[in-house]
Image (tube, rainbow, N blue to C red):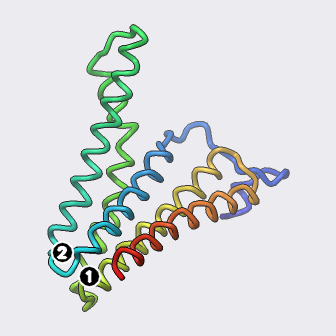
Amino acid sequence: MPSAMFRSDGTARHPPDQPQTDYAGAIYGSLLAASVIAGAAGVYASFPRLGLVVLLLATGIVFWAAHVYVHLAGERVRGQPMTWAQVRRVAGHEWPMVQAAVPPAVAVAISPLLDLGLPETAWFALGVALAEQVAWATVAAARAGASRRVMALSGLLNLLLGLVIVAAKTAVHH
């Protein structure tokens, strides 16, 4: 990242006028996408690419809807009235969970253009999901004002979480 994005103490600058992104939702969505790919890989020989694209996007949407519902239900329990504006706000805040499913789905969709077979497609999409998970975690740490060391640790921790999914995929597939 450019040095202009960091304060003299090594922590990241956060422009106050930039909209807030739900980085937790994006990281979770990336983990979810990687898990879907790893789970589908066990039956991948009979799993068409279009089916995996639909499964990735549908899973992201279902989990997004569940998170929106849980958030809104939690506010109702506290006695706060629900408005359509609030529903739209919560739905928009949680949307990065769905957005995180898009890059791995695109990876699957373009895999024939790269002349990838089905097993290679699964690895390609899993790599995309893992890369975006690490990127989201690192950006989230930077936007939170973390030091470069904490940003690197955040990225590393998410890489390790992703590698656990890779190990699970390898164990299930073999």
Q: Looking at this view, is 165 or 137 the one in front?
A: 165
Q: Looking at this view, is 46 or 83 the one in front?
A: 46
Q: Earlier in the sequence, mark 2 or mark 1?
A: 2
Which structural element holds mark 1? helix
**In the depicted structure, whether residue 52 falls above or below residue 70:** below
Q: Depth-wise, is mark 2 or mark 1 nearer the camera?
A: 2
The disc label shown at residue 111, or none: 1
| CA separation in Å, label 2 and label 1 | 9 Å
Q: Is residue 138 left or right of residue 123?
A: right
Give the quarter of the image for residue 166.
bottom left
Residues at discs 2 and 1 in contact (Cβ within 8 Å) = yes
Q: How many marks?
A: 2
Q: Residues within 10 Å of mark 2 (few under 14, many from 20)?
A: some
Which structural element holds mark 2? helix
Give the quarter of the image for residue 14.
top right
Question: Residue at (37%, 62%) from the top-left corner?
Answer: 35
Question: Residue at (70%, 46%) from the top-left corner?
Answer: 145
Quadrant that contains the C terminus? bottom left
Instruction: Give the percent coordinates (x, y) of residue 93.
Output: 40, 37
Q: Is residue 126 left or right of residue 13?
A: left
Question: Residue at (29%, 16%) from the top-left corner?
Answer: 83
Give the quarter of the image for residue 81.
top left
Q: Is residue 110 left or right of residue 92?
A: left
Q: Looking at this view, is 149 or 161 the one in front?
A: 161
The kind of residue on which mark 1 rests is Ser
Quadrant that contains the N terminus? bottom right
**In the depicted structure, whether residue 123 falls above or below residue 84:** below
**In the depicted structure, whether residue 173 falls above or below residue 143:** below
Instruction: Give the percent coordinates (x, y) of residue 46.
Output: 15, 78
Question: Residue at (31%, 77%) from the top-left corner?
Answer: 122
Q: Residues within 10 Å of mark 1 (few under 14, many from 20)?
A: some
- Judging by the rendered image, the residue that carries numbered circle 2 is 49
